[in-house]
Image (tube, helix red, strand yellow):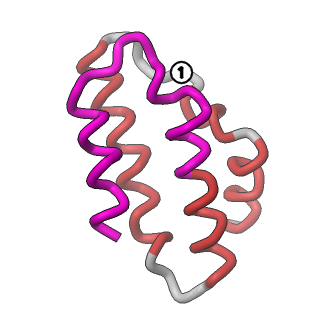
């Protein structure tokens, strides 16, 4: 089931932000929670899950999520440190 969800998110990564708060502080927390949920899948034994999780996370960071007009500086530093933690 996780693989299917990741396939969907890989095809349409920004759907994960549907309904995200507009408030800058709340959006930053939402953004960080989304990426925290990916961490355990980046280190799983299943290579397919690791690959798709990596792909989805990268697409979310590059397809406009970071361009959110209410982004805080904390979100930017979080994404820079996100890959170091894995």
Q: Is residue 71 left or right of residue 68?
A: left
Whole-percent x, y for residue 22 in the image: 40, 11
Quarter of the figure that contains the C terminus:
bottom left
**Point 23% across, 26% down: residue:** 73
Horizontal side of residue 85 vs 22, given as left or right: left
Q: Is residue 48 above or below residue 2?
A: below
Tell me which corner region of the image, top left, top right, bottom left or bottom right, holds residue 25: top left
Closer-to-camera residue (52/37): 52
Dot 1 crowding, Cα within 10 Å, few <14, some 14–19, many 20+:
few
* Residue 3 percent across, percent down from the top left: 71, 68
25 within the magenta span: no
> What residue is shown with label 1?
19
Residue drawn at x 65%, y 64% as measured from the top left: 52
Span of residues in magenta? 57-86
Q: Is residue 2 above or below residue 78?
A: below
Q: Residue at point 58% right, 62% down? A: 53
Horizontal side of residue 16 vs 41, given as left or right = right
On the picture, is 12 further left or further right than 58?
right
Q: Reply yes or no: does residue 62 show up in magenta.
A: yes
Residue drawn at x 29%, y 15% as measured from the top left: 24
Residue 15 lies, in percent from the top left, at 65, 32
Q: Hey, which residue is sitting farthest bottom in the picture?
A: 45
Residue 51 or residue 16, whichever sits in front = 51
Instruction: Give the overall secondary structure of the magenta segment.
Output: helix
In percent of width and height, residue 41 lies at: 49, 70
Residue situated in front as seen by the camera: 18 or 60: 60
Question: Looking at the figure, which quarter contains the N terminus?
Answer: bottom right
């Amino acid at each position: 089931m996780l693989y299917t969800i990741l396939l969907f998110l890989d095809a349409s990564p920004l759907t994960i932000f549907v309904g995200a708060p507009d408030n800058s502080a709340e959006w930053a927390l939402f953004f960080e929670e989304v990426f925290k949920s990916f961490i355990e899948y980046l280190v799983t034994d299943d290579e397919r899950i690791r690959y798709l999780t990596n792909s989805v996370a990268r697409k979310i960071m590059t397809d406009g999520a970071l361009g959110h007009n209410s982004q805080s500086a904390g979100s930017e530093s979080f994404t820079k440190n996100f890959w170091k933690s894995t």
